[in-house]
Amino acid sequence: MAKPAKTPGVTLRNPERTRERILFAALKEFAMSGIAGARVDAIARRAAINKRMLYHYFGSKEGLFREVLRLKMSQRQAWAETLSGDPAESLSFWFEAACKDTDWVRLLEWEALQEADQRLIDQKERRAATTRGLERIRQRQVRGQISSELDPRHVMLTMRSLTMFPAAFPQLTRLIMGRPVSDPKFQKERAVFLKKFAAAFQSPTHRISSKLNRQSRKA
Amino acid sequence: MAKPAKTPGVTLRNPERTRERILFAALKEFAMSGIAGARVDAIARRAAINKRMLYHYFGSKEGLFREVLRLKMSQRQAWAETLSGDPAESLSFWFEAACKDTDWVRLLEWEALQEADQRLIDQKERRAATTRGLERIRQRQVRGQISSELDPRHVMLTMRSLTMFPAAFPQLTRLIMGRPVSDPKFQKERAVFLKKFAAAFQSPTHRISSKLNRQSRKA
DNA sequence: GCTCCAAGTAACTTGATGGTTACTTAATGG
DNA sequence: CCATTAAGTAACCATCAAGTTACTTGGAGC
Protein backbone atom coordinates (compact mmCIF):
# COMPACT_ATOMS: atom_id res chain seq x y z
CA MET A 1 0.00 0.00 0.00
CA ALA A 2 1.54 3.24 -1.08
CA LYS A 3 -0.63 4.93 1.50
CA PRO A 4 -2.42 8.19 0.57
CA ALA A 5 0.85 10.16 0.86
CA LYS A 6 0.88 11.06 4.53
CA THR A 7 -2.53 12.52 5.02
CA PRO A 8 -0.84 15.87 5.37
CA GLY A 9 -0.99 17.32 8.83
CA VAL A 10 -2.47 14.35 10.58
CA THR A 11 0.54 12.10 10.84
CA LEU A 12 1.51 11.27 14.36
CA ARG A 13 5.11 12.15 13.77
CA ASN A 14 5.72 15.56 12.32
CA PRO A 15 9.14 17.11 12.76
CA GLU A 16 8.40 20.42 11.08
CA ARG A 17 5.29 21.05 13.06
CA THR A 18 7.14 20.17 16.25
CA ARG A 19 9.99 22.52 15.39
CA GLU A 20 7.58 25.32 14.71
CA ARG A 21 5.62 24.70 17.87
CA ILE A 22 8.81 24.86 19.87
CA LEU A 23 9.94 28.05 18.17
CA PHE A 24 6.62 29.76 18.70
CA ALA A 25 6.37 28.71 22.31
CA ALA A 26 9.96 29.77 22.88
CA LEU A 27 9.30 33.18 21.37
CA LYS A 28 6.53 33.74 23.84
CA GLU A 29 8.45 32.47 26.84
CA PHE A 30 11.65 34.30 25.97
CA ALA A 31 9.80 37.52 25.31
CA MET A 32 8.08 37.12 28.64
CA SER A 33 11.01 36.09 30.84
CA GLY A 34 14.23 36.50 28.93
CA ILE A 35 16.84 33.88 28.40
CA ALA A 36 17.77 33.44 32.05
CA GLY A 37 14.20 33.65 33.32
CA ALA A 38 12.56 31.41 30.76
CA ARG A 39 11.98 27.82 31.91
CA VAL A 40 12.71 25.08 29.45
CA ASP A 41 9.92 23.06 30.99
CA ALA A 42 7.53 25.94 30.45
CA ILE A 43 8.47 26.15 26.79
CA ALA A 44 7.98 22.42 26.41
CA ARG A 45 4.64 22.56 28.17
CA ARG A 46 3.45 25.49 26.08
CA ALA A 47 4.52 23.77 22.88
CA ALA A 48 2.96 20.54 24.11
CA ILE A 49 6.06 18.58 23.27
CA ASN A 50 8.51 16.58 25.29
CA LYS A 51 11.38 18.60 26.66
CA ARG A 52 13.83 16.22 25.14
CA MET A 53 12.76 17.24 21.64
CA LEU A 54 13.81 20.76 22.34
CA TYR A 55 17.35 19.56 22.87
CA HIS A 56 16.95 17.27 19.89
CA TYR A 57 16.26 20.21 17.59
CA PHE A 58 18.13 23.09 19.16
CA GLY A 59 20.83 21.68 21.37
CA SER A 60 20.43 24.07 24.26
CA LYS A 61 18.37 26.88 25.65
CA GLU A 62 20.76 29.43 24.21
CA GLY A 63 20.70 27.74 20.85
CA LEU A 64 16.95 27.96 20.89
CA PHE A 65 17.07 31.62 21.79
CA ARG A 66 19.42 32.31 18.92
CA GLU A 67 17.11 30.54 16.52
CA VAL A 68 14.07 32.43 17.79
CA LEU A 69 15.82 35.75 17.39
CA ARG A 70 17.04 34.81 13.94
CA LEU A 71 13.61 33.74 12.79
CA LYS A 72 11.83 36.80 14.08
CA MET A 73 14.53 38.98 12.63
CA SER A 74 14.28 37.56 9.14
CA GLN A 75 10.51 37.84 9.22
CA ARG A 76 10.66 41.49 10.14
CA GLN A 77 13.41 42.37 7.75
CA ALA A 78 11.71 40.81 4.77
CA TRP A 79 8.66 42.77 5.76
CA ALA A 80 10.49 46.04 6.41
CA GLU A 81 12.02 46.26 2.95
CA THR A 82 8.62 46.63 1.34
CA LEU A 83 7.67 50.04 2.59
CA SER A 84 9.16 53.45 2.24
CA GLY A 85 7.81 56.97 2.41
CA ASP A 86 8.27 60.21 4.17
CA PRO A 87 9.25 60.30 7.82
CA ALA A 88 5.79 61.38 8.94
CA GLU A 89 4.30 58.13 7.71
CA SER A 90 7.09 55.76 8.63
CA LEU A 91 7.54 57.21 12.11
CA SER A 92 3.97 56.62 13.15
CA PHE A 93 3.86 53.37 11.25
CA TRP A 94 6.88 51.90 13.01
CA PHE A 95 5.68 53.21 16.31
CA GLU A 96 2.40 51.36 15.91
CA ALA A 97 4.24 48.28 14.72
CA ALA A 98 6.35 48.32 17.88
CA CYS A 99 3.26 48.63 20.04
CA LYS A 100 1.66 45.70 18.31
CA ASP A 101 4.68 43.44 18.29
CA THR A 102 5.93 43.88 21.81
CA ASP A 103 7.47 40.42 21.70
CA TRP A 104 9.99 41.75 19.25
CA VAL A 105 10.81 44.83 21.29
CA ARG A 106 11.21 42.76 24.39
CA LEU A 107 13.46 40.29 22.63
CA LEU A 108 15.74 43.13 21.60
CA GLU A 109 15.61 44.44 25.12
CA TRP A 110 16.63 41.13 26.60
CA GLU A 111 19.41 40.98 24.08
CA ALA A 112 20.53 44.45 25.11
CA LEU A 113 20.63 43.45 28.74
CA GLN A 114 22.45 40.18 28.50
CA GLU A 115 24.94 41.58 26.01
CA ALA A 116 28.26 40.42 27.36
CA ASP A 117 29.46 42.91 24.74
CA GLN A 118 30.14 39.83 22.66
CA ARG A 119 29.48 39.39 18.96
CA LEU A 120 25.85 39.95 17.97
CA ILE A 121 23.71 37.03 16.97
CA ASP A 122 23.07 37.63 13.30
CA GLN A 123 25.62 40.37 13.03
CA LYS A 124 26.34 40.05 9.35
CA GLU A 125 22.77 40.17 8.15
CA ARG A 126 21.89 42.87 10.60
CA ARG A 127 24.73 45.03 9.42
CA ALA A 128 23.56 44.55 5.88
CA ALA A 129 19.99 45.42 6.78
CA THR A 130 21.17 48.52 8.62
CA THR A 131 23.19 49.62 5.63
CA ARG A 132 20.14 49.21 3.41
CA GLY A 133 18.15 51.27 5.89
CA LEU A 134 20.71 54.05 5.85
CA GLU A 135 20.66 53.98 2.08
CA ARG A 136 16.91 54.46 2.08
CA ILE A 137 17.33 57.49 4.33
CA ARG A 138 19.85 58.96 1.92
CA GLN A 139 17.41 58.49 -0.92
CA ARG A 140 14.80 60.39 1.01
CA GLN A 141 17.30 63.12 1.61
CA VAL A 142 17.84 63.38 -2.12
CA ARG A 143 14.10 63.49 -2.66
CA GLY A 144 13.91 66.24 -0.09
CA GLN A 145 11.79 64.35 2.39
CA ILE A 146 14.56 64.51 4.96
CA SER A 147 16.96 67.37 5.48
CA SER A 148 20.35 66.72 3.94
CA GLU A 149 21.90 68.56 6.83
CA LEU A 150 21.30 65.59 9.10
CA ASP A 151 23.60 62.62 9.39
CA PRO A 152 21.64 59.55 8.21
CA ARG A 153 22.94 57.47 11.09
CA HIS A 154 21.65 59.97 13.60
CA VAL A 155 18.36 60.16 11.78
CA MET A 156 18.00 56.41 12.00
CA LEU A 157 18.95 56.27 15.66
CA THR A 158 16.47 59.04 16.37
CA MET A 159 13.68 57.27 14.55
CA ARG A 160 14.36 54.03 16.34
CA SER A 161 14.33 55.90 19.63
CA LEU A 162 11.02 57.57 18.94
CA THR A 163 9.28 54.48 17.68
CA MET A 164 10.51 51.87 20.13
CA PHE A 165 10.83 53.66 23.42
CA PRO A 166 7.22 53.51 24.64
CA ALA A 167 6.93 49.79 23.98
CA ALA A 168 10.31 49.21 25.59
CA PHE A 169 9.54 51.19 28.74
CA PRO A 170 5.81 50.76 29.30
CA GLN A 171 6.07 51.68 32.95
CA LEU A 172 7.66 55.05 32.18
CA THR A 173 5.23 55.71 29.37
CA ARG A 174 2.33 55.00 31.62
CA LEU A 175 3.77 57.25 34.29
CA ILE A 176 4.13 60.10 31.84
CA MET A 177 1.04 59.65 29.71
CA GLY A 178 -1.34 58.31 32.31
CA ARG A 179 -2.37 55.50 29.98
CA PRO A 180 -0.97 52.03 29.37
CA VAL A 181 0.96 51.63 26.14
CA SER A 182 -1.55 49.03 25.05
CA ASP A 183 -4.36 51.60 25.14
CA PRO A 184 -5.45 52.34 21.56
CA LYS A 185 -6.19 55.89 22.57
CA PHE A 186 -2.60 56.42 23.58
CA GLN A 187 -1.33 54.80 20.41
CA LYS A 188 -3.51 56.95 18.24
CA GLU A 189 -2.59 60.12 20.04
CA ARG A 190 1.08 59.35 19.90
CA ALA A 191 0.89 58.50 16.22
CA VAL A 192 -0.66 61.90 15.58
CA PHE A 193 2.02 63.59 17.63
CA LEU A 194 4.78 61.80 15.77
CA LYS A 195 3.31 62.85 12.45
CA LYS A 196 3.55 66.45 13.53
CA PHE A 197 6.90 65.97 15.13
CA ALA A 198 8.31 64.34 12.01
CA ALA A 199 8.64 67.84 10.59
CA ALA A 200 11.85 67.95 12.59
CA PHE A 201 13.44 65.74 9.94
CA GLN A 202 12.46 67.92 7.05
CA SER A 203 14.78 70.50 5.70
CA PRO A 204 14.24 73.96 7.16
CA THR A 205 13.14 75.43 3.83
CA HIS A 206 10.53 72.71 3.25
CA ARG A 207 9.30 73.11 6.72
CA ILE A 208 8.96 76.81 6.53
CA SER A 209 7.06 76.79 3.29
CA SER A 210 4.62 74.08 4.39
CA LYS A 211 4.01 75.82 7.70
CA LEU A 212 3.51 79.13 6.05
CA ASN A 213 1.15 77.62 3.53
CA ARG A 214 -0.92 76.00 6.18
CA GLN A 215 -1.06 79.16 8.22
CA SER A 216 -1.80 81.47 5.32
CA ARG A 217 -4.63 79.15 4.23
CA LYS A 218 -6.22 79.64 7.61
CA ALA A 219 -5.79 83.37 7.61
CA MET B 1 35.71 52.59 81.35
CA ALA B 2 33.43 54.79 79.28
CA LYS B 3 35.37 53.80 76.17
CA PRO B 4 36.27 56.49 73.57
CA ALA B 5 32.73 56.53 72.15
CA LYS B 6 32.94 53.98 69.34
CA THR B 7 36.07 55.02 67.54
CA PRO B 8 33.84 56.02 64.63
CA GLY B 9 34.26 53.88 61.57
CA VAL B 10 36.57 51.30 62.99
CA THR B 11 34.16 49.34 65.13
CA LEU B 12 33.94 45.68 64.29
CA ARG B 13 30.19 45.80 64.04
CA ASN B 14 28.79 48.44 61.76
CA PRO B 15 25.23 48.01 60.58
CA GLU B 16 25.10 51.09 58.38
CA ARG B 17 28.24 50.31 56.56
CA THR B 18 27.08 46.74 56.03
CA ARG B 19 23.74 47.92 54.71
CA GLU B 20 25.39 50.29 52.31
CA ARG B 21 27.84 47.68 51.11
CA ILE B 22 24.98 45.34 50.38
CA LEU B 23 22.99 48.01 48.55
CA PHE B 24 25.92 49.06 46.44
CA ALA B 25 26.86 45.50 45.55
CA ALA B 26 23.24 44.71 44.80
CA LEU B 27 22.94 47.71 42.50
CA LYS B 28 25.84 46.43 40.49
CA GLU B 29 24.64 42.84 40.37
CA PHE B 30 21.05 43.72 39.60
CA ALA B 31 22.07 46.16 36.89
CA MET B 32 24.27 43.48 35.42
CA SER B 33 21.92 40.50 35.58
CA GLY B 34 18.47 41.62 36.56
CA ILE B 35 16.44 40.31 39.40
CA ALA B 36 16.12 36.76 38.12
CA GLY B 37 19.68 36.53 36.89
CA ALA B 38 21.43 38.09 39.87
CA ARG B 39 22.92 35.59 42.32
CA VAL B 40 22.47 36.30 45.97
CA ASP B 41 25.80 34.69 46.67
CA ALA B 42 27.42 36.99 44.14
CA ILE B 43 25.97 40.02 45.87
CA ALA B 44 27.18 38.76 49.23
CA ARG B 45 30.64 38.06 47.86
CA ARG B 46 30.87 41.45 46.19
CA ALA B 47 29.76 43.19 49.36
CA ALA B 48 32.13 41.03 51.39
CA ILE B 49 29.43 40.22 53.89
CA ASN B 50 27.75 37.03 54.96
CA LYS B 51 24.77 36.10 52.87
CA ARG B 52 22.68 35.80 55.95
CA MET B 53 22.98 39.52 56.62
CA LEU B 54 21.34 40.27 53.33
CA TYR B 55 18.24 38.50 54.56
CA HIS B 56 18.67 40.11 57.92
CA TYR B 57 18.39 43.57 56.40
CA PHE B 58 16.21 43.09 53.35
CA GLY B 59 14.18 39.96 53.83
CA SER B 60 14.45 38.63 50.33
CA LYS B 61 16.07 39.16 46.97
CA GLU B 62 13.02 41.04 45.73
CA GLY B 63 12.97 43.20 48.82
CA LEU B 64 16.57 44.07 48.17
CA PHE B 65 15.80 44.93 44.57
CA ARG B 66 13.01 47.23 45.64
CA GLU B 67 15.29 48.99 48.06
CA VAL B 68 18.00 49.42 45.47
CA LEU B 69 15.55 50.90 43.00
CA ARG B 70 14.12 53.18 45.62
CA LEU B 71 17.52 54.43 46.71
CA LYS B 72 18.78 55.09 43.21
CA MET B 73 15.51 56.76 42.36
CA SER B 74 15.60 59.18 45.26
CA GLN B 75 19.22 60.04 44.52
CA ARG B 76 18.45 60.88 40.92
CA GLN B 77 15.29 62.77 41.65
CA ALA B 78 16.89 64.98 44.22
CA TRP B 79 19.57 65.68 41.70
CA ALA B 80 17.19 66.22 38.79
CA GLU B 81 15.23 68.98 40.45
CA THR B 82 18.23 71.26 40.51
CA LEU B 83 18.64 71.96 36.82
CA SER B 84 16.43 73.50 34.23
CA GLY B 85 17.04 75.24 30.91
CA ASP B 86 16.13 75.10 27.28
CA PRO B 87 15.61 71.76 25.53
CA ALA B 88 18.87 71.99 23.62
CA GLU B 89 20.81 71.93 26.85
CA SER B 90 18.74 69.46 28.80
CA LEU B 91 18.46 67.00 25.92
CA SER B 92 22.18 66.59 25.49
CA PHE B 93 22.72 66.79 29.20
CA TRP B 94 20.34 63.97 30.01
CA PHE B 95 21.64 61.94 27.14
CA GLU B 96 25.14 62.16 28.51
CA ALA B 97 23.87 61.38 31.98
CA ALA B 98 22.19 58.23 30.69
CA CYS B 99 25.40 57.14 28.99
CA LYS B 100 27.36 57.66 32.17
CA ASP B 101 24.89 56.03 34.52
CA THR B 102 24.05 52.91 32.58
CA ASP B 103 23.27 51.10 35.83
CA TRP B 104 20.23 53.29 36.17
CA VAL B 105 19.05 52.77 32.63
CA ARG B 106 19.47 49.04 32.96
CA LEU B 107 17.60 48.98 36.23
CA LEU B 108 14.66 50.68 34.56
CA GLU B 109 14.95 48.24 31.70
CA TRP B 110 14.83 45.26 34.00
CA GLU B 111 11.86 46.80 35.68
CA ALA B 112 10.17 47.24 32.32
CA LEU B 113 10.74 43.64 31.44
CA GLN B 114 9.65 41.97 34.62
CA GLU B 115 6.64 44.24 34.94
CA ALA B 116 3.81 41.85 35.68
CA ASP B 117 1.82 45.02 34.94
CA GLN B 118 1.54 45.29 38.68
CA ARG B 119 1.78 48.43 40.75
CA LEU B 120 5.06 50.28 40.33
CA ILE B 121 7.60 50.25 43.08
CA ASP B 122 7.65 53.82 44.24
CA GLN B 123 4.57 54.78 42.33
CA LYS B 124 3.48 57.65 44.46
CA GLU B 125 6.76 59.50 44.53
CA ARG B 126 7.37 58.79 40.88
CA ARG B 127 4.01 60.22 39.93
CA ALA B 128 4.80 63.31 41.93
CA ALA B 129 8.19 63.67 40.29
CA THR B 130 6.63 63.24 36.86
CA THR B 131 4.07 65.91 37.60
CA ARG B 132 6.83 68.28 38.64
CA GLY B 133 8.66 67.49 35.42
CA LEU B 134 5.57 68.25 33.35
CA GLU B 135 5.19 71.49 35.24
CA ARG B 136 8.70 72.50 34.33
CA ILE B 137 7.93 71.83 30.68
CA ARG B 138 4.88 74.06 30.88
CA GLN B 139 6.99 76.80 32.36
CA ARG B 140 9.37 76.55 29.45
CA GLN B 141 6.43 76.74 27.10
CA VAL B 142 5.38 79.96 28.75
CA ARG B 143 8.90 81.26 28.44
CA GLY B 144 8.83 80.33 24.77
CA GLN B 145 11.61 77.77 24.95
CA ILE B 146 9.20 75.04 23.91
CA SER B 147 6.32 75.38 21.50
CA SER B 148 2.98 75.69 23.24
CA GLU B 149 1.42 73.67 20.47
CA LEU B 150 2.98 70.50 21.85
CA ASP B 151 1.41 68.42 24.60
CA PRO B 152 3.81 68.50 27.57
CA ARG B 153 3.34 64.78 28.12
CA HIS B 154 4.41 64.02 24.59
CA VAL B 155 7.32 66.37 24.90
CA MET B 156 8.47 64.57 27.99
CA LEU B 157 8.05 61.13 26.45
CA THR B 158 9.96 62.28 23.41
CA MET B 159 12.81 63.66 25.48
CA ARG B 160 13.06 60.50 27.50
CA SER B 161 13.11 58.48 24.29
CA LEU B 162 15.86 60.53 22.74
CA THR B 163 18.04 60.60 25.81
CA MET B 164 17.71 57.03 27.05
CA PHE B 165 17.45 54.93 23.94
CA PRO B 166 21.11 54.57 23.04
CA ALA B 167 22.11 53.50 26.53
CA ALA B 168 19.14 51.14 26.67
CA PHE B 169 19.88 49.46 23.34
CA PRO B 170 23.66 49.57 22.99
CA GLN B 171 23.67 46.78 20.45
CA LEU B 172 21.33 48.64 18.10
CA THR B 173 23.19 51.88 18.60
CA ARG B 174 26.45 50.22 17.75
CA LEU B 175 24.88 48.62 14.69
CA ILE B 176 23.64 51.97 13.45
CA MET B 177 26.46 54.25 14.50
CA GLY B 178 29.38 51.90 14.11
CA ARG B 179 30.68 52.84 17.52
CA PRO B 180 29.96 51.51 21.00
CA VAL B 181 27.79 53.72 23.17
CA SER B 182 30.64 54.01 25.62
CA ASP B 183 32.83 55.66 22.99
CA PRO B 184 33.26 59.32 23.96
CA LYS B 185 33.36 60.24 20.28
CA PHE B 186 29.90 58.86 19.80
CA GLN B 187 28.62 60.60 22.89
CA LYS B 188 30.01 63.92 21.81
CA GLU B 189 28.67 63.59 18.31
CA ARG B 190 25.25 62.60 19.51
CA ALA B 191 25.15 65.45 22.00
CA VAL B 192 25.87 67.86 19.18
CA PHE B 193 23.18 66.30 17.04
CA LEU B 194 20.65 66.52 19.85
CA LYS B 195 21.45 70.17 20.37
CA LYS B 196 20.58 70.84 16.76
CA PHE B 197 17.63 68.53 16.80
CA ALA B 198 16.18 70.20 19.88
CA ALA B 199 14.92 72.91 17.56
CA ALA B 200 12.04 70.53 16.91
CA PHE B 201 10.64 71.50 20.28
CA GLN B 202 10.68 75.20 19.58
CA SER B 203 7.61 76.86 18.27
CA PRO B 204 7.39 77.09 14.47
CA THR B 205 7.44 80.87 14.50
CA HIS B 206 10.60 80.98 16.60
CA ARG B 207 12.17 78.43 14.38
CA ILE B 208 11.20 80.11 11.20
CA SER B 209 12.48 83.47 12.24
CA SER B 210 15.81 82.13 13.44
CA LYS B 211 16.20 80.03 10.30
CA LEU B 212 15.27 82.94 8.09
CA ASN B 213 17.70 85.15 9.88
CA ARG B 214 20.46 82.66 9.39
CA GLN B 215 19.64 82.23 5.74
CA SER B 216 19.16 85.88 4.96
CA ARG B 217 22.48 86.60 6.62
CA LYS B 218 24.06 84.21 4.16
CA ALA B 219 22.25 85.61 1.15
C1' DG C 1 6.90 -8.33 6.67
C1' DC C 2 11.39 -6.55 8.13
C1' DT C 3 15.02 -3.27 9.12
C1' DC C 4 16.60 0.91 10.49
C1' DC C 5 16.57 5.67 11.73
C1' DA C 6 14.46 9.67 13.24
C1' DA C 7 10.72 11.13 16.23
C1' DG C 8 9.10 10.76 20.60
C1' DT C 9 8.65 9.60 25.88
C1' DA C 10 9.52 9.14 30.87
C1' DA C 11 12.35 9.15 34.52
C1' DC C 12 16.73 10.47 36.29
C1' DT C 13 21.11 13.16 37.51
C1' DT C 14 23.62 16.84 38.88
C1' DG C 15 24.55 21.21 40.19
C1' DA C 16 23.15 25.57 41.51
C1' DT C 17 20.59 28.68 44.41
C1' DG C 18 17.32 31.08 47.49
C1' DG C 19 16.46 30.83 51.91
C1' DT C 20 17.11 28.84 56.96
C1' DT C 21 18.80 26.89 61.29
C1' DA C 22 21.55 27.06 65.02
C1' DC C 23 25.04 29.10 66.83
C1' DT C 24 28.72 32.93 68.44
C1' DT C 25 30.03 37.43 69.73
C1' DA C 26 30.13 42.60 70.07
C1' DA C 27 28.01 46.45 72.12
C1' DT C 28 24.71 48.90 75.18
C1' DG C 29 22.43 50.25 79.31
C1' DG C 30 21.21 49.40 83.92
C1' DC D 1 29.41 42.91 85.65
C1' DC D 2 25.60 41.02 83.68
C1' DA D 3 21.47 40.60 80.77
C1' DT D 4 19.67 41.53 76.50
C1' DT D 5 19.70 42.52 71.87
C1' DA D 6 21.45 43.10 67.44
C1' DA D 7 25.31 41.94 64.26
C1' DG D 8 27.58 38.35 62.36
C1' DT D 9 29.09 33.33 60.87
C1' DA D 10 29.08 28.64 58.94
C1' DA D 11 26.90 24.83 57.59
C1' DC D 12 22.86 23.10 55.87
C1' DC D 13 18.51 22.00 53.04
C1' DA D 14 14.74 21.82 49.95
C1' DT D 15 13.81 22.93 45.55
C1' DC D 16 14.09 23.76 41.11
C1' DA D 17 15.76 23.47 36.53
C1' DA D 18 18.97 22.34 32.65
C1' DG D 19 20.48 18.72 30.43
C1' DT D 20 20.80 13.16 29.84
C1' DT D 21 20.11 8.33 29.76
C1' DA D 22 17.80 4.68 28.24
C1' DC D 23 14.09 3.33 26.25
C1' DT D 24 9.78 2.92 22.77
C1' DT D 25 7.52 3.57 18.41
C1' DG D 26 6.06 5.39 13.81
C1' DG D 27 7.03 5.08 9.08
C1' DA D 28 9.84 4.87 4.67
C1' DG D 29 12.34 1.92 1.68
C1' DC D 30 13.42 -2.67 0.47
Image (cartoon, coloured by chain):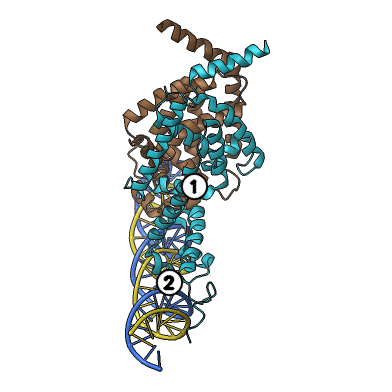
Chain colours: A brown, B cyan, C yellow, D blue
Residue A45 percent across, percent down from the top left: 34, 51
Residue B8 visible here: yes
Residue A39 percent across, percent down from the top left: 40, 54
Q: Which residue is mark 1?
A: B79
Residue A72 percent across, percent down from the top left: 47, 37
Q: Quadrant of the C terminus of chain A?
A: top left
Residue B149 to residue B101: above or below: above
In the picture provided, is A183 more to the left or to the right than B210?
Answer: left
Q: Amino acid at mark 2?
A: Arg
Residue A85 visible here: no
Q: Which residue is mark 2?
A: B52
Residue B70 percent across, percent down from the top left: 41, 53
Residue C12 to residue B215: above or below: below
Which is in the foreground here, disc 1 or disc 2?
1
Q: Nearest the camera: B147 or A94?
A: B147
Q: Nearest the camera: B114 or A21?
A: B114
The residue lying at 50 percent from left, 16 percent from top is B205
Chain of residue at mark 2: B
Chain of residue at mark 1: B
The residue lying at 47 percent from left, 84 percent from top is B2
Tell me the SS state at disc 1: helix
Rendered image quadrant of residue A177? top left
Q: Which disc number belongs to residue A70?
A: none
Sequence-first tag of 1 and 2: 2
Q: Amino acid at mark 1?
A: Trp
Residue D2 to residue B122: above or below: below
Tell me the SS state at disc 2: helix
- How packed mark 2 is, by other alpha carbons closer than 10 Å (few <14, some 14-19, many 20 or more), is few
Q: Nearest the camera: B13 or A2?
A: B13
